[in-house]
Image (cartoon, rainbow, N blue to C red):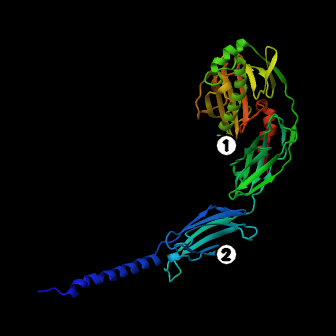
Amino acid sequence: MPVSKKNIYRPLAIVPVIMIVGLLAWLLLVIFEGEKPLVALEPMPEYLAKEQTFTIKLRDSKRGLKRLRVSYNQGGRDVILLEKEFPFDGLLNRQGVHQFEQTVTMDPVSLRLAQGRVDLNVQAWDYSRRGGGDGNMSLVYHKMTVDTLPPSIRTVTRMHNINIGGTGLVVYRTSSDTVKSGVYVEDLFFPGFPLDNENRKGLYVTYIAVPYHSSLDPKIYLWAQDGAENTSTSTFYFHVRRRLFQNEKMTITDRFLERILPYFSFYETDPELTNIERYVKINNDLRVEDDERFALISKETSPQRLWEGPWIRLKNAATMAKFGNQRSYYYKGEKIDEQVHLGIDLASLPNSPVQAANNGRVLFAERNGIYGLTVIIDHGQGLSSLYGHLSNISVTPDQHVKKGEIIGSTGQTGLAGGDHLHFAVMVNGVFVDPIEWWDSHWIKDNITKKLELLDQQ
C-alpha cells in the first residue's frame, strides 16, 4: 500500500515546534532563574566604637545585579546609608553589572547612635523575574554593639617613690568593661593583674620599672582598654629618685680570649675576624639577642603573686659587680667596647650552691649565650629572677621551687671571667636593681604596706 507524503513530512513538521518550545523553556529558566546574588561584608566587628568603613562586594553571574540597599536599624528605626540601581544593558542584561564593590562608613558619633545594639543590613536584588518581578534577594545583616564610652581607671595607692633602675608598685581600680590595663613608663608597658581577694574586687596591681637610662621625669601613666578598643589614660603622683652608677674598667687579655671563645663555637661569626673582634661581636650582638629572649620568656608569668618576704642572696658571697655599672672594655690599652651591667655579680667558693631567691616556677633552665648555663624563675605578676654563669643546673622548666631550694651551682660558663653568680631581677622583662628585693625594709615600705592598707579602705 503506498505511503502518503503527508504522513512522511508530519514528524519533520514537529521538529520546529519542539525547538520553539525548548527555546521558550530555556528563556523561562534564564529569566526566572532562582540563584540569589552573592553578598560579602567586611569587616564584621563586634563593636562599633569609632568611624568604621565597611566593604561590600556583590556578584551575580546570571541575570546581573539590579539594586543594592544598605541600612542600619537601631531601636526599630531603619535608616538608609546607601541605595543604588544598576541599569539593564544588552540582550538578557549580558552587558549589565554582574560584579560590584562599594564602601560605606558608619560613624557612631555623627550618626548619633545610642549605646547598645545596632544592625547593619545589606540587601541585593538581581534581574530575575521571580518574586513577582522583584528578583532574587540576598540579605546580610551584622549585629554590633555601639560602645563609644572609654573605661575608667584611677590609682588607689598614693605614694610612688621609685629609684632610677628600680621597681615600683601601683594599685589601681578600673571599670567592669575593662579587658586590658596597666601602666606605661614611656613606651614600656607593664600589665596589671587582678587582686582576687574578696575585699579587693575591681583592683589591679602592677609592678613597674624605671630603666637605668631613664630621665628624672619620665612619662608614667595608667592605661585601660575595653572590648570595643576604647582607651583611657590617667596620671598619678610619682617621684623618681636620682641614681648614680659606677664606672668599671674591664681588661681583656689574650689568655682570657683563648679560654672563653671555644665555648661560643655555636655562635657563627665571620671566620676572618680576629679573636678580639669576635669577642666584641659576641659581647654586643649576642648580648642583645639574649636580653630580648629573656624579655619574652619573663612575660610567661603567673597572674598570682608567688613570692613571700625578702629575697635570698647567695650565701657568704662578696659583691664583685653592681647593677648599672658602666663598663668600659680595654684590650692592650685601647678601649674596644662599652656595656651596662644589668645584674649583680656574687662570688663565693667555686661551685657554691645557688638557692632560689624566692618561691616561683622555673621558666628557663639551659645554656643561653653570654650568660652560659642559666635559670630563670617566675615569681608571679611580672617578676622574675635570673641566675647566670652556672656550672650545673638541678631544676627543669615548669618545676615549682621554694625559696632557698638549690637550683644549681656557681660557675664560669658564658662570658664569665671567673667562678661567680650573675644574679638579676626583671620586671616584665626589664632589668632592675636586685638589691631592693634583698631589703626587708624596702619591701615593707614599697610593697606589703601598700597592699595591707587596701584591706583598711
In the displayed structure, does residue 183 sit left or right of residue 367? right
Q: Nearer the viewer, residue 81 or 10?
A: 10
Answer whether residue 246 is visible to the viewer in this image: yes
Q: Position of residue 259 (x, y in %)?
A: 67, 14
Mark 2 nearby-residue class (10 Å; few <14, some 14–19, many ≥20): few
Q: CA distance from mark 1 to mark 2?
A: 51 Å
Q: Write down the quadrant of residue 364 in the picture.
A: top right
Image quarter of the N terminus: bottom left
Decide if residue 412 is on the left or right side of residue 444: left
* Viewer-closest of 158 and 319: 319
The answer to whether residue 315 is seen in the rendering is no
Left or right, 103 with reference to 341: left
Instruction: Determine which residue is flagged by label 1.
Output: 304
Do the residues bearing badges 1 and 2 touch, measured as CB atoms within 8 Å?
Answer: no
Residue placed under numbered mark 2 in the picture: 80
- Which residue is found at the position 71% from the left and 62% from the top? 49
Of tags 1 and 2, the one toward the viewer is 2
Amino acid type at mark 1: Gln
| Image location (x, y in percent) of residue 124 | 57, 73
Q: Residue at x 64, y 29 (%)?
A: 375
Q: Position of residue 35 (x, y in %)?
A: 48, 72
Q: Position of residue 276 (x, y in %)?
A: 72, 18
